Structure formats: structure tokens, C-alpha cells
Image: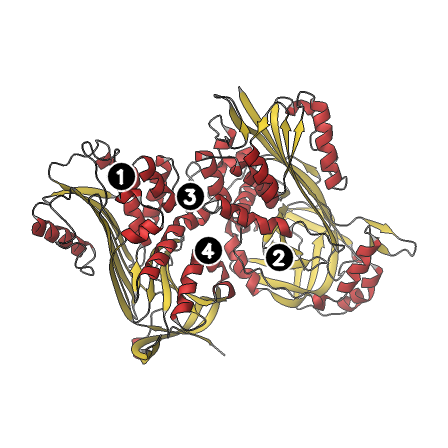
Amino acid sequence: MKINIVLLINLTLLWVNFIDDTNGIIIPKLKRSSVKSARQFISDSDDIFIPYQGERFTVFDWNLYKLIANKYQGNVLISPVSLKLALVLLFEGAQDQTAYELAGALQLPANEWNVRDKFSPILRSLQPISDEYTLNLGTRIYLNNSLSIRQSYASIVKAYYNTDIVSSNFTDARTTANNVNSWVRNLTNGNIEKMIDDETTIKDSMMLVMNVLYFKGLWNGNKFTADRSKFNKFYQSPDTHVDVNYMTSVGSYYFLESQELDAKILRLPYVGRKFAMNIILPRTVDGLDMLINKVNPFILARHALLLQRLPVEVTIPIFKFDVTSHLEPILRDLGIRDIFDNTATLTKVIKTKRGQNLMVSDIIQKAGIEVNENGTTAFAATEVNFGNKVADQTFYADHPFIFYIEDETMGTIMYMGRVINPLEGSGNREMSKNTPEHLNVLQMQSPYVPSVTGLNAERNNYFGIELLQGINEQTTGNVVISPLSVKSALTILSEATGGDTREELLSALRLPSDISRIRDISKQILQSLLTTTNGTEIDAVNRLWLEQGTQLSDDFNNILKSNYGGDTSNVAFSNIQSTVLTINNWVRQFTRGHIDSIVDSSSLSPATKILLTSALYFKGNWKKAFDKNLTRNRCFNIPNQACHTVPMMESVSNYFYASILDLKAEVVEIPYDDDKISMLVFLPTKEGLQSLSILSRDLSYTSISSILNSLRETELILLMPRFSVETKTDLRSTLETLGIRQLFNVNANFTNFLINGGAKVDSVLHNAKIEVNEDGSVAAAVTGLSVVPLMGSSIDAFRVNRPFLLMLIDRQTNSIIFSGRVIRP
């Protein structure tokens, strides 16, 4: 018997409905306390906008929006945060592939505690009580009284998501529908009369997950008044228009004209200094489709830092519409499929009999919005003053545009939409006949394979950052490693192992349990890495060295070649000197002579049966090369050793740069010539090894995406030492601190690998080297495991004159290729 979940996600957004008070002045329907509080914001000089500096959680939001905007015609409205709050409740009850798909699409962290930590501040921010705006948020699970919910699940959703579980008799569908509709009606102040129109649709359901979000706010500064509104043409296309009512204001707004998006961006704040609507207006009447394809959260985060407060003449249409969206096909396109099929694994939600499957039958969101003028008697004088200003810029939204409403204290997108026709009312949209063949949706390279970009890339990076942190704590001096090389070798071992040995690897590497997914991720990373232009060289290879006569399982050799770009080679480990020479010659040839060796006679023994090596080579030229004539000896401050003279390179150019308060560090991105690979340099704001150690630890809790989002283009004097760092180390102890222990145990499970006999890993040898000079960088790494070992191998100044951290990243996937620490160049 199937058990179905009907997931209903509901919200409404209503601004202000106007009435005439006894003096004939137009005022909003608000409590008197609200009007009194709003008077505190008469002057728009109080609107000081500081963009949210933390990690944004909006990649899913824009992926969702783009798919909806391109799949459906007409106006669009969606509440991403409402949908995410409902889906995360499913994630808490999911396991295996179901949980993996939800985590990948929603950009969730690697473990459940981090997921809860991510949502807790968002929920707290959306549950304030204020007289300056109305914000209602509610979440409920209606459960058929014939089922028993797992107590652990009920405790989690109540404690971390403030979600109530209500027992209901679904066989009495009318009563259940009335109860649901009454609850929704109350939270939305009557704006959603019926969430469930036909009670027969829930009669066979076992569970309803409900989320309601309602917002009502006043424009800050009262810059729009009804007496200034007038009708004019709104151009849906160059040849089609409708007459709509426009509201107009001249005032001081945060505004930007973006060449990158070929659009204007306007921020309209609400009373309360918490929420704002951002409108993005394409420059041309027919430019909306191109704008939707271009826009992404990273571009918008950069643009938020570039907004300037200017006198602007604003003309935007008054509009009101509501939308009912059935989201299953959209979510399937985003990679969330398992919850809708009978393969769904939602076993942590309720107690079921063997053979019963809990699955989602539908996801519905109802959303409504009304935007119009708003003002009070207290704002009248201010409005007159604004009317007398001379505007430097005009923002005339007389053609289709997109908008989003953001909680600026948390960077949470509450609502996002598109206005094609301000007169369009409501209803379900038809599928667009003109869906673009190519849509820029982050993390979606294939409709069937979750991409490794964005959050999945962040999960991939957790291991690399933890690895660097572990090595930094166990060693002194300069360090360079290749997390990608190490992870490649360990991923191959995950194919070879079983039981607890494999589970430890998957957990530490943040890999899914589904082996086909692991292979897809590995191939995507490898394909992205090896796609280079403009003279950049990147090579990656994996090789399995086998003692003559060692038998592998039949499929493993094919798996190595087809999924990991690897091969095998036979050697005689009994002849140690010859084998060492053969392996090191291969390493030297592959790394163009930059790494001389990875093994020596002490690394191997006649008992060795298998050696796994993973090698990575990179050579790239800076996009903006340093002038060799400017390189001169300068001071590099080594802790406890004072000044150390080193060749210091110098460049004056535009770089993406930020001083990140949370990290207590300055960061600069130095791009290579292919516009795909770049180096991030992290310089602690305080001198000393302790500051560098703290920075290394803090990076474990900061995503690469959030760091990149914080950077903005700045003209810099960049001074950086010319240096060469090589690190050769056994990673065994570091990997054991990261939870990989069974691999080194005599009971290690290699049943998927060897036909006869057991094995264990004695060591994980890693050799990495990086050279940085005026032309660019050369980096190489090899990682190896013995006895089934691994191997992976007025202008601001940014003065790298003290110890620093560095990373080489693949900008397409945000994967960390190399990372390191420089104490003494």
C-alpha cells in the first residue's frame, strides 16, 4: 500500500489597501500604533543600506525561479523560503538517495546539525513581532490518525523548525479540509480563503505538510501618493502594449545601471529597516529573457555592493495578481525526483509496515501580491520635498521586469517574481512555447545528474579545507597540498571497499552512497578540470601499480578507466629499487619534471601488492602578468624572526578583493588567463602564526561561494612574494583525525577489489609543489597509497608581506585544486 504526502506550501503577500479617512487623506489600513511607528521614518535619509555580508543561501531560489520563468508564460510569483522550509522537513525524514537529492538541490550542508544551524537564524529572522510591518510564518504537519509518527522526527521538527504536528481523520476529508483552510485563512489575514478547494484530493492522503508566509509592509519614506498616479502605456513587447496605472516618485534611492546585466537595478525599502523590494529592469523592451538567463545570486551579491544612493525619478506600475503553482515538474528538473516515486526513502518520518512507501503526490504553492501607492498624513511634507528634487537618474518600468523581496538582515529571499502584464490577474500559467534551448541554471548540467557546482561543490570542498586544516595543525612551515588529487585517490578506494571501510570514506569525502552518483560527480569534476583555454595546462591521471600475479575483480579495471581516467601497470614489488625507479620516472614525466619522486625504498616492501597513485599538474599564466622590472627585494615578516628579504612582485590593476570581517582577513582573487582558474590569497588582518591558525580553522566553516560573493572589483597595488613550495608527507594520521580509520586496519574491507586475500593501507603519500612567479603558476601533486595506498597527488594596497594561505580554484565548479600555507617564501 502506498502512503502519499500532499505537500501544500501556501503564502500570500499583500501590501496596502487604501481607504479615505475622515480628513480625506489616503492612509493605509494599519493599526494606529503602526502609523505612529511609521512616522519615525519620514526622512529617507534614515535609509542606510548595508548589504548582507554573510553566506547567502539563494542558489536554489534562483534556479527555481529561472525554471518557472522559462516554463510558464505570464506573470510569475514564488516564495523560495516557504518552499525550502517545507522541503527541509522532508529532508529531516529522508535517507539515502532521497536525502541526497534534497541536499544537493537545496544546497544543504554536509550533516543534519549544520542544516539546522543554517535554518535556525532564518526562522528567527522571520518570526519577529513589529508594529512597522506584518509578518506571519506558520508550519504544520497534518497526520492521518491511523499512523504513528516517529517521536524523534516529531521532536526535531518542533525544536528546530517550530512545526506542529496535528492528528487528523483524513477519511473525513471535509472536516480536515475545513481545519486546514481555517488555519491558512487566519495566518494570511483572510487573503487565502481556501487552500484546499476540493476535499476529495486529500481523501487518500496520509500526511499534509503546510507552510504559510504572509507579509504586509509600507514603503519607507512615503514617496508614492495616489494623487500622482496616472495611466500610461506598458509595453509587453515592442509591438504590444496595455494601458496601466503608474505610481511615480522622485526621491533618493539605491540605484545601479549594470552593463553586465544590461539592466537597471532599484531598491525600494519598507518601513522597519528589514525588508526591501529589488526591481531589475532590462534596458530594452524585449530584454527580459536574456536578463533572466544572465542573472544569478553571485552577480546580484556583487551588484548589491555597487548600489549608489542617488536622486531617481521612479515610475512603476500598480499591479496585483495571485498564482497557484504545481511544482513537481519544476523540482524534478532541479534534481528532486525520488520523493515523488515509490522508491522514496522517507523512513524517518512515520512507522510503516514492510512494503509501504511514503511518497509525495503533489507540491502546491499559492502566492499573491499587491503593489500600489502608500502614504500617511505624516509623510505629506516629505513627499512634497521629494517632488521638488531634480533626479539624476530615471527608472521607468514601462516594460516587463523581474523583482525579489529580501530580508536584508539575513539575505533571505522571501518572494521573487516577474511582471509581464500588470493587468494580469490570477490562475495557473500555460507552458511557454518559447522556452530557451539553453538556460543558465546553476548546478544543473544534466536533467538527470545533480551537478557538482554550487552547494554540492561546497560539500566536496569541506574535505579539502579540513585536510589543509589538519596538516597545518600537525606541521610547521610552508605547506601545499592538492585536495583534488587526494580525494580522487580516496574516491577510487571507495569503489574498492565495502562495509564500515567504505562508509568512513563516503562520510569524510561527503560522497553519496549511490555508486553511480559518485562516478557522475567524479567525471563532471574531471571534465571541467581538463577543459582549458589560452595556454593553461591541466592534467590529471590515476594509476594502479599491481604486483605481477595480483588479481583484481573483473569490473574494477574498466571502472578505473571509464570513470576516473585511470589505468593499471604491473611491477615487481619484490625488486624495490627497480619499482621505485619506474614509479618515480612516471611521476617526473607526468609533472614535467616538477616532482622528482613520490616513493623511495622505505615507502615500499616486498609484501606490497598494490600502489595507487593520483597525479595532478597545472600550469597557468596570470591574466594580468606582473611586470618583472617592478620585482624587487622587500621585507616579508616571519613570526619570531622579524624581516626576511624576498623577491616581491608588484602589479597595479583591478582585482576582486574584500576585507572579510568574519574571517578577520583580506582576500584577493588573482585570475589566470583562461578565466576559469584563479588563485585566492588569504591574508590575516593581524600578524602572527596564531592569526593564521585561526584563519585556517575558520575557513572550515566558510564556503568558497560566500567568499567569492564578498569580493568586489577594486583597483589595487598588489605586492606578493615570488615563491616555490613543495610538501611531501604521509597523510595517514591526518586522515585518521578526519574519521578514516578502517582503511588502515587489518580488518579493512576490500571485497569489491581483490579476488583473493585481504589488504590494508599502510600509508597515504602525498607530494605537491607550487611555483609562483611574474608570469603565473606551476603546480603539481601526486598522491599515493601503499598496500592499497593512495596518492594524490587613494589606490588600496594588498601587501602579502607576512604568512598567508592560498587556494587554486576551478571557477566553474568552485572546486579547490590546490591549497597551501606560506610561512617563509
Q: Earlier in the sequence, mark 2 or mark 3?
A: 2
Question: Residue 497 sits in which quadrant?
Answer: top left
Residue 451 circle label: 3
Closest to the camera, between mark 3 and mark 1, is 1
Inspect the image, locate mark 4, and give the three-letter code of the amino acid beneath it. Answer: Tyr
Inspect the image, locate mark 1, and give the three-letter code of the amino acid beneath it. Answer: Ala
Residue 408 circle label: 2
Closest to the camera, between mark 2 and mark 4, is 4
- Cα distance, mark 2 to mark 1? 50 Å
Residue 195: x percent and y percent?
Answer: 69, 33
Which residue appears at 45% of the width and 43% of the height?
444
User: Does 192 sit left or right of 809 as displayed?
Assistant: right
Q: Earlier in the sequence, mark 2 or mark 1?
A: 2
Q: Earlier in the sequence, mark 3 or mark 1?
A: 3
Residue 73: x percent and y percent?
Answer: 60, 39
Which residue appears at 44% of the width and 66% of the height?
667
Residue 748 circle label: 1
Which residue appears at 51% of the width and 59% of the height?
260
Inspect the image, locate mark 3, and give the three-letter code of the amino acid beneath it. Answer: Ser
Q: Nearer the viewer, residue 560 or 486?
A: 486
Closest to the camera, between mark 1 and mark 4, is 1
User: On the image, numbered disc 4 is attached to which residue?
Assistant: 701
